[in-house]
Structures are given as structure tokens and as C-alpha cells.
Image: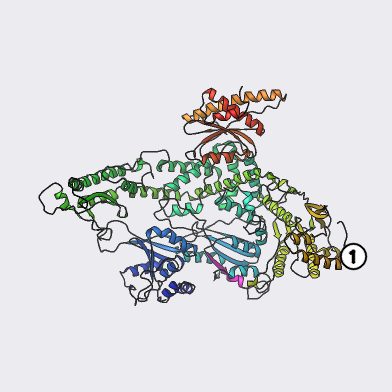
């Protein structure tokens, strides 16, 4: 461990850090030199105590609470200066050990800086409470902060919880490459075997890990050499790993990696990790790095991002991560079919849907395990459970809930029975509801006494009042009230006579001063004054109280200042008040955490199910808006273009074999390949696709190769990189694969590149895979290729105004026109260069030139009664109007008015997107607003974004066409007030010449 730290000290670059490192010695884990000032390591000293803590977690930075600071010494101090931007204590004096630290209020920022740099931190807290002056406070390890796993001790507010960062192990077996992911937070591990080198690199690129360990099986590659990456296979992985910090390990990969993790995090041998591996036998292969980047599944500069068009812009966080992971690791056919069936049901839902509270499973596990879940988190857990139950009680949503069970099993590794899930959710929700103080309750007001500053009671009581129901802490509440009363009495008896005496003294400016003040830093109420003591004691009012005053002292026994005073009676009352109820509330919350930890699998499963539900509902909403369909590839369009806005050129692709594709520059070859790749990937994941209709096989792998760049770090040219990827594609392709190669063999001389390309086309044709190989190497058509199924396709051109222009349409045949000169001119190449290029081209090719060229709920309150009345009035008024309109048109197809409620915490279903809706908004003052829209979800979100409207409810119905929606909107604006309802937009009814019965 000491050598491990020594290596990291050698990596420090800041001049101040380098100066501190010179004072370290590597004979103990702290690096402290006992011969320097403050370097005493004798038993009983603070340094010795810190060394004991450090020995328990030798590879973590140690921060020790000392009064109002968290301090570090030796090696840990150097880390703080280097990575947290802190200054060393005592400057750079060379006679003292390195020391650094941060104020208590800056702890979060310091931890963020350290974990962002890859370090884990062990935090040691002081035992809080009264202590004897000059006696050493007790200390204990309160928690740890790891990359992806924040420090949560004493957390009383909501904390943005990052996704957990695994420890990653990579090994090699007869099946291929293997990756092992171990999550310290979740106490889980998974193993994925049989990976290609490219798929493994993709996983490393998309995985933010804490530590990387490489198994010694990687040191010997398939060519038998010991220099990993020297020949062919292994080079891409070596290039990825060599730029990162890693360690080697040997032995059984799984058991040894788990042993390393326990050592790394200081776990006992008894700690077990749950295997959440889901069999990958029937799953398509994970995406190669090139495929993932070229379709934007991994955000890449200059490439349209697939994720941005799959989900609305306001759908981020956990749902986005789920969709990304699904694209990078497509599911088995059965799961993909279930996902698509779920999306189809979501597409037809007409009832309002939950808001889908998303909670990180890792956050739940850590907070409950450490007994640090606060009332905010319990309320959020209850929302998750209640939304599961809401789906269960609705006949339409219940079908969706049942379908989501298997995708959730794949995502969590937990197999839970449907009835068990529902029953456990009901029990846990009821248990939280009985314990936790919920919105709407108002029986826990902050104490108030006129002579004590209100801020004191607000600061002291707000951290624990409004956390649990009063019935559970009635005795503690009563004690707080008695303690507050006693404090008020003590201040009244000991301080007020002095203040009255001062006020009675009509001295000029500069006379005696005194007041009762809240000392926020010390959590106390004291007397603050000066020049109030009499020159001569004469037994006048207030003198006795003045004699009782003594200087106020802080927690370390030091005087606070010359103007701060207190009394024994006030101090006793303050102590009693501080100890009154907070401890009992924390005890109850920790007890509930312990109780729910036994149900942790249910909570993980429920939270993940809602994440998936939110992701799929959001995807269906965006797919409807873009006019996508559920998955031939007929009338295909590029995924990054919005069909709804008419910006895409459609293409019909009926692929039954390999296509050899030609076309001009800018003619759409690359766009077509990306579009097919994206549609196929979305289809095998069960998502909607950017097409008018689609029939997509469940491919076992999808491989897209676009442009290649050189890799100087590996000593490989762009053509070497391309050939490495070609090797991977050819060896991995089967008759059930989709292979898409853009401009094959572009990186070498034309003659031999053409021959290599032809040989690759023959090989793919023999394999029998579907796919497209695009090329500008027109000599390939003169080679006499031995192919049985490959056919020629081209991107079309047309001759307009004396110029050849691309049509971006897929046609049969071969296109030999490259539009190279036109493209160069369009991009600003000087005209003289273009003309000379044309002359050279004509001199060589002049002879070859050719032409061608929901359930009803009983009303239980006033708002529900109002909902019922409005629904009845709207239905009667609009249905009558529809009968008149359709009678005039002499048609028998009369649509029905079917009103749907959107209650607080709910949102419209995806089926409203693109449909004309008329809606009624219910404000909290019982006034109504009538409107119409083609984007009900956006309109609801806009209304609720206004101040005081966050819990607004709505009533809506869908009608065929915007014109009819406008008529019915105006009709309701004019008719609802006649029936006694108050409208806030009544004047809008005058904007049209209809709306009367």
C-alpha cells in the first residue's frame, strides 16, 4: 500500500505539492516524518489515532474532523493540495509535516474534487455533544466517498446521486474476451463472456469505472506472442487500456476480482456479492465501437446523436441511460418482443399516466444500508410504490405493468413474482405512510417565544420537525415545548432585567448597550452588550442579574468574545433544549431504514421498473411526434431528420441479400447506411423506427463501418485500423447478421484496394448476411466477382439546368458519377485548381466517358365534485353541438365526447401527441380555463410551470381535427359561464363568430 501511494506522489505536478512531497517518508501509511514538527506518532496522539483509521482503509484519503475543519496530514495532505485546490496549513515551511484541510461547510466540494480525480475518501467524525474542556473528543469512521458513491452521513437534504462506478476486470477465455463488473454500492457483480475486442472497447468507452484490473490471460494473444497487441488481435484493446491506469491480477477471474474489491473497499470476508448476470446466449452481440459511434449511440462530434431523437429533450438521467445501455447491448428476441408489445400498448393508452418517479437503485441501497435515508427519500420511495399501485389498479396500465416485469428482470437480475411485487408495494407504502410526515399535514409548527429570535427556533427545529408523524414522537414534542418554555423563562429572568435597565438609562450616544442575540455559529442564544455594568453597585434593578453573567464559551472552552455573555441557568436550559427531540426522530428514521432494507430487492425492482416505464412512454411520445412506426425497410428516412417537419427524403429498401452500393459524393450513401443501421438496431430493441412501415429480422449482430482514422499511439495507419475492423466483421458475421460498410478500402492505393474490397464482398456474399457495401472503387465491377446473391444498387442523380445533382433516392444499377469536382468547388477549392483537375481527368479518361449516366372514482372532496360537474356539462354541450354539425354533413359517424382527467402528479398519454384536444384547466381557486391544442403534453407542462400551478388538474377530450377543436373550445368558453362556472378566459369566446347554441 505504501508503494501504491508512493507512485501517486510521483505523479503530483503542482509546485506546492512537489515541495510537500519532499517532506514525506515512506515508513508508515501516512507518510509522516516523526522528526518534523507536529509529526508525533506516539500512542494517544491525534496523529496516532489517524494512523489507526488509515490502516483500516489504506488506499483511501483520510479526512479527520477537528473542530470546524476536516484535516489531513502527510500523503493525504499532498493529495488535497494537488487535486482539491487547497492550500497547505502553515504555508510551505520545511520544518513541519504536510498538513491541509477544508472547512466543514466545504466538505462536499472537497469530496467531489477528490472522487472526480479517482480517489476514495474515508471520513472520520467527532462525537458531538458536551465534553470536558481540554479532553480529547471521541472519533469514529462515519462513512466513505468513492467515485460514483457519495458521502451520506447526516444527510438532511436531497443529494444528486451519481450512477455507481464499478470495478472492472477484463480477462480472456476460449469464448473470447470477458468483462466482469463489480458494484460496491449494490454488492453485485455480472460477467459477460464471448465478447469481441471491438465490443469490449465500446463497453470501456461508455463505462465510468473506479478501478480497472486486467487478467494475466490477456498477456498472450492468439499469435502466441507475449507482447500484448503486437500483432493483429489485441491492438485495439491495448490502445484503449495503455492510456489508463490499471493493475494486473491472476487466478480465477471472478473470485480473485471479488477478493480485490473487498481489499480495496475494506470489506470483511463475510460480505457477499449477488450475481446479477443474465445469460447472453440468445442475445445479439454488443455493438462494436465503430457502429456505436457512427450512429450516435455514443455521442460523437459531427455524428447525429441517436439518443437525442429517441426521447424528448426533457427526458434525461436514468431513463436515458437505460435506453443507451439497451442500444449498446441489444436484448434477446423475447425481451425485444415484450418491449415492442409494451410500446404498442402505451401508444394506445387514453387514460392519464403517472409522472414516473425515478430513483437510483444505488442511492436506495446505500442510504438504507447506512441508515441515512431521510424523510425526502422516504417520500420519494412512497411515490415509486404508489405509482406502481396506480398502474396495477388501472386496467389499461395493469397490462403494461405485467409486460414490464421481464425487462426489469433483465435490467436488475432480480426475478420477482407479479403478485409479490404488488403485495409488497402495498405493505411498504402503508408502512412509510404511517411513519413519515407527508405533504398536507400541519401539526408540527416551529416553536415561538417573543423574547427569543425566531431564527434560533427555525434553525434548531426545522432539521427534525416535519420528518415523522407527531404520534410517534408525542413525548419528545412535549419535552421540546417544555424545554423551549424553560429557555424562554431563563432568558426572561436572567437577561430581560439587564435590558430593561439599559433602556431606562437615557445616556447619550455611546452609552450602555445590550440585547438578546442568536449566535448562529454556536447554536446558542446569549446576551450581547457592553458598558452595561454599573460604576458603583447600589442594589438597583438588574444588578443581581449582571453579577450572574459569565463570558460565553465555544465547544472548545474558549471565550467567544468580549461582548457575549450567558448564565448557568440559560446554559442548562439550552442544553436541555438541544437534547430534547432530534435524537428520537433520527432513531425512528434509522429504524425505518433498517426495516425497509429487508425489502431492498422489491425497492430496487420497483424503482427500475418505473425507470423503464418512463423511458418507453417518453420514446413512444417522441416517436408519435416524429411519425415513426413499429417495425422490407419500406419508406425509410434518416433518423436525425424530422419527418413531421417534411425535411427527410424517403427511400424504400427491400433487402434480401448483399447490396453493392455506388453513388456521388453527397448523394446519401452514408446517410442511408446510418439510417438502416439505426432502424435495425431500434427494431431489435423493440423501439419505434424512423420509417412509414418496417419489417426487421432479429439480427444476431449489427456492424457498421464508416471512416477510419490512424492511431499514432499504436503505430497504426488508418488503413491498418480499417483492416483490423474488417477482420473483426468478417470473423463475427453470420447468415443472421447485418453488415454495413461505407466506402470500403479508401485508405490505400486504388488497384490493390479494389481487389481487397472485391474479395471481402465475395466473402460476405458466401456467408449470406444482409448488408450494404458502398464504394467509389468502380474498378470492382470489372473484376468478375464470384458472387451468387449480391446485387448492385446506386444513389440516383438527375440532370437539371446543365448540372448533375443528387436525388438521394435508392435505385437499381451502378452510378459512376462522383460529383467530385462539384463537391470540391462547393467547399471553396479555388476555380483554377478545379479547371486543372478537369483537364487532367479528361486527358486520362476521355475515352472511358459514358453517359448514363381509466376506472371511475367516487367524489370525495369539492374539487372532485367540480370535476364531475364540469365533465357532465362539457359532455352534454359538446355532444349536442356535434349532433348538429354531423347532421348538416349528413354522416352517420358521430364521434363521442370521452372526457379524461389528468390529476396532480399525472400527465397525458402519448396518444394525445399529434391529436387535436380540447381541455379544461382547474385552478386552485376553482376557476376554469378552456383551451385547445395539438400538443397536450407540452401545454400541460407549460401551465404547470407557472407559479402556483404545479398541482393543477385537467379534463380533456380528443376530437378529429383542429377546426372542430377550435369550434368546441369557443362553444365551451361561451356556454360554461351560463351554467354557473367561472372562467378566467371568458373574453376569448368573442374571438370567433360561433359558440352559441
Callout 1 secondary element: helix
Magenta-drawn stretch contains 213? yes
Along the line of sight, which residue is nearer the eye, 584 or 279? 584
Q: Nearer the viewer, residue 658 or 56?
A: 658
What residue sits right under mark 1 in the picture? 847
Q: Name which quarter of the figure residue 621 lies in.
A: top right
414 horizontally vs 763: left or right: left
Q: How many marks?
A: 1
Question: Which residue occupies 83% across, 54% down?
Answer: 802
Residue 769 placed where, x, y %? Answer: 76, 57
- Quadrant where the N terminus is found in the figure: bottom left
At 40% from the left and 59% from the top, the residue drawn is 106
Identify the magenta region.
210-224
Mark 1, residues whose alpha carbon is within 10 Å: few (<14), some, or many (≥20)? few
Residue lying farthest left? 538
Q: Residue at x 60, y 24 (%)?
A: 877
Amino acid at each position: 500500500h505504501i508503494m501504491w501511494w508512493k507512485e501517486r506522489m510521483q505523479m503530483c505536478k503542482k509546485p506546492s505539492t512537489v515541495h510537500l512531497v519532499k517532506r514525506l517518508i515512506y515508513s508508515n501509511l501516512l507518510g509522516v516524518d516523526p522528526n518534523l514538527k507536529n509529526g508525533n506518532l506516539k500512542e494517544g496522539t491525534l496523529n496516532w489515532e489517524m494512523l489507526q483509521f488509515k490502516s483500516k482503509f489504506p488506499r483511501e484519503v483520510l479526512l479527520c474532523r477537528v473542530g470546524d475543519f476536516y484535516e489531513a496530514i502527510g500523503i493525504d495532505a499532498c493529495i488535497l493540495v494537488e487535486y482539491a485546490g487547497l492550500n497547505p496549513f502553515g504555508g510551505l515551511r520545511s520544518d513541519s509535516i504536510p498538513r491541509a484541510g477544508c472547512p466543514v461547510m466545504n466538505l462536499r466540494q472537497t469530496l467531489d474534487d477528490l472522487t472526480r480525480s479517482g480517489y476514495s475518501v474515508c471520513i472520520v467524525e467527532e462525537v458531538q455533544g458536551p465534553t470536558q474542556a481540554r479532553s480529547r473528543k471521541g472519533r469514529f469512521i462515519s462513512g466513505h466517498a468513492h467515485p460514483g458513491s457519495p458521502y451520506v452521513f447526516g444527510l438532511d437534504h436531497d443529494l444528486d446521486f451519481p450512477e455507481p462506478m464499478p470495478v472492472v476486470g477484463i480477462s480472456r477465455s476460449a469464448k473470447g474476451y470477458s468483462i466482469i463488473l463489480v458494484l460496491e454500492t449494490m454488492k453485485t457483480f455480472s460477467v459477460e463472456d464471448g465478447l469481441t475486442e471491438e465490443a469490449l472497447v465500446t463497453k470501456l468507452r461508455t463505462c465510468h469505472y473506479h478501478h480497472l484490473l486486467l487478467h494475466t490471460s490477456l498477456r498472450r494473444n492468439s499469435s502466441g506472442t507475449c507482447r500484448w497487441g503486437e500483432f493483429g488481435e489485441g491492438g485495439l484493446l491495448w490502445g484503449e487500456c495503455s492510456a489508463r491506469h490499471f493493475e494486473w491480477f491472476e487466478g480465477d477471474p471472478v473470485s480473485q476480482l471479488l477478493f480485490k474489491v473487498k481489499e480495496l473497499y475494506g470489506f470483511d470476508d463475510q460480505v457477499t456479492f449477488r450475481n446479477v448476470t443474465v445469460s447472453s446466449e440468445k442475445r445479439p452481440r454488443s455493438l462494436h465501437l465503430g457502429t456505436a459511434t457512427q450512429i450516435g449511440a455514443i455521442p460523437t462530434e459531427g455524428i447525429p446523436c441517436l439518443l437525442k431523437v429517441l426521447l424528448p429533450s426533457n427526458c434525461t438521467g436514468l431513463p436515458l441511460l437505460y435506453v443507451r445501455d439497451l442500444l449498446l447491448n441489444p436484448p434477446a428476441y423475447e425481451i425485444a418482443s415484450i418491449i415492442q408489445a409494451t410500446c404498442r400498448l402505451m401508444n394506445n393508452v387514453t387514460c392519464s399516466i403517472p409522472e414516473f418517479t425515478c430513483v437510483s437503485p444505488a442511492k436506495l441501497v446505500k442510504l438504507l444500508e447506512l441508515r441515512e435515508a431521510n424523510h425526502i427519500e422516504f417520500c420519494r420511495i412512497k411515490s415509486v410504490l404508489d405509482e406502481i399501485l396506480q398502474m396495477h389498479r388501472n386496467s389499461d396500465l395493469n397490462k403494461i405493468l405485467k409486460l414490464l416485469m421481464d425487462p426489469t428482470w433483465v435490467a436488475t437480475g432480480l426475478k420477482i413474482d407479479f403478485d409479490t411485487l404488488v403485495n409488497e408495494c402495498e405493505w411498504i407504502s402503508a408502512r412509510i405512510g404511517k411513519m413519515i410526515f407527508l405533504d398536507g399535514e400541519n401539526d408540527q409548527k416551529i416553536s415561538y417565544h417573543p423574547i427569543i429570535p425566531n431564527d434560533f427556533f427555525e434553525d434548531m427545529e426545522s432539521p427534525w420537525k416535519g420528518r415523522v408523524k407527531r404520534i410517534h414522537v408525542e413525548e419528545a414534542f412535549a419535552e421540546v415545548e417544555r424545554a423551549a418554555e424553560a429557555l424562554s423563562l431563563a432568558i426572561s429572568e436572567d437577561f430581560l432585567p439587564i435590558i430593561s435597565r439599559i433602556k431606562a438609562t437615557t445616556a447619550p450616544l455611546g452609552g450602555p448597550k445590550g440585547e438578546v442575540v442568536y449566535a448562529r455559529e454556536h447554536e446558542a442564544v446569549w446576551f450581547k452588550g457592553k458598558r452595561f455594568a454599573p460604576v458603583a453597585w447600589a442594589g438597583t434593578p438588574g444588578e443581581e442579574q449582571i453579577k450572574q453573567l459569565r463570558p460565553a464559551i465555544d465547544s472548545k472552552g474558549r471565550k467567544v468574545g468580549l461582548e457575549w455573555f450567558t448564565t448557568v441557568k440559560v446554559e442548562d436550559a439550552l442544553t436541555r433544549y438541544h437534547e430534547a427531540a432530534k435524537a428520537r426522530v433520527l432513531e425512528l428514521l434509522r429504524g425505518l431504514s433498517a426495516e425497509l432494507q429487508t425489502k431492498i430487492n422489491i425497492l430496487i425492482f420497483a424503482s427500475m421498473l418505473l425507470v423503464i416505464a418512463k423511458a418507453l412512454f417518453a420514446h413512444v411520445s417522441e416517436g408519435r411526434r416524429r411519425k415513426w412506426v413499429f417495425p422490407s425497410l419500406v419508406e425509410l428516412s434518416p433518423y436525425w431528420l424530422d419527418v413531421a417537419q417534411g425535411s427527410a427524403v424517403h427511400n424504400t429498401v427491400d433487402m434480401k441479400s448483399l447490396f453493392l452500393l455506388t453513388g456521388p459524393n453527397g448523394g446519401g450513401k452514408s446517410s442511408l447506411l446510418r439510417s438502416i443501421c439505426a432502424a435495425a438496431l431500434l427494431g431489435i430493441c423493440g423501439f419505434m423506427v424512423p420509417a412509414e412501415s418496417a419489417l426487421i429480422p432479429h439480427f444476431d449482430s449489427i456492424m457498421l463501418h464508416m471512416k477510419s482514422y490512424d492511431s499514432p499511439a499504436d503505430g497504426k495507419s488508418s488503413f491498418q485500423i480499417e483492416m483490423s475492423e474488417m477482420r473483426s466483421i468478417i470473423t463475427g458475421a453470420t447468415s443472421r447478421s447485418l453488415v454495413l460498410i461505407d466506402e470500403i478500402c479508401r485508405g490505400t492505393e486504388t488497384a490493390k484496394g479494389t481487389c481487397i474490397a472485391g474479395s471481402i464482398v465475395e466473402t460476405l456474399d458466401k456467408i449470406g448476411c444482409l448488408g450494404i457495401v458502398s464504394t467509389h472503387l468502380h474498378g470492382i465491377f470489372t473484376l468478375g466477382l464470384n458472387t451468387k446473391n449480391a446485387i448492385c444498387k446506386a444513389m440516383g442523380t438527375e440532370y437539371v439546368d446543365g448540372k448533375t445533382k443528387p436525388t438521394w433516392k435508392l435505385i437499381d444499377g451502378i452510378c459512376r458519377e462522383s460529383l467530385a469536382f462539384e463537391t470540391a468547388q462547393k467547399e471553396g477549392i479555388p476555380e483554377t485548381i478545379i479547371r486543372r483537375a478537369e483537364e487532367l481527368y479528361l486527358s486520362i479518361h476521355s475515352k472511358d466517358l459514358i453517359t448514363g449516366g381509466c376506472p371511475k372514482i367516487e367524489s370525495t372532496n369539492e374539487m372532485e365534485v367540480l370535476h364531475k360537474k364540469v365533465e357532465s356539462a362539457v359532455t352534454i354541450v359538446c355532444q349536442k353541438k356535434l349532433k348538429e354539425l354531423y347532421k348538416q354533413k349528413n354522416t352517420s359517424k358521430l364521434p363521442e365526447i370521452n372526457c379524461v382527467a389528468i390529476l396532480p402528479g399525472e400527465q397525458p398519454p402519448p396518444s394525445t401527441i399529434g391529436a387535436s384536444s380540447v381541455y379544461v384547466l382547474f385552478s386552485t381557486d376553482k376557476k376554469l380555463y378552456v383551451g385547445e391544442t395539438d400538443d397536450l403534453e407540452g401545454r400541460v407542462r407549460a401551465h404547470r410551470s407557472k407559479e402556483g400551478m404545479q398541482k393543477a388538474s385537467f379534463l380533456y377530450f380528443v376530437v378529429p381535427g383542429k377546426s372542430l377543436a377550435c369550434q368546441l373550445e369557443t362553444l365551451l368558453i361561451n356556454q360554461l359561464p351560463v351554467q354557473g362556472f367561472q372562467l378566467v378566459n371568458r373574453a376569448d369566446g368573442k374571438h370567433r363568430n360561433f359558440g352559441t347554441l
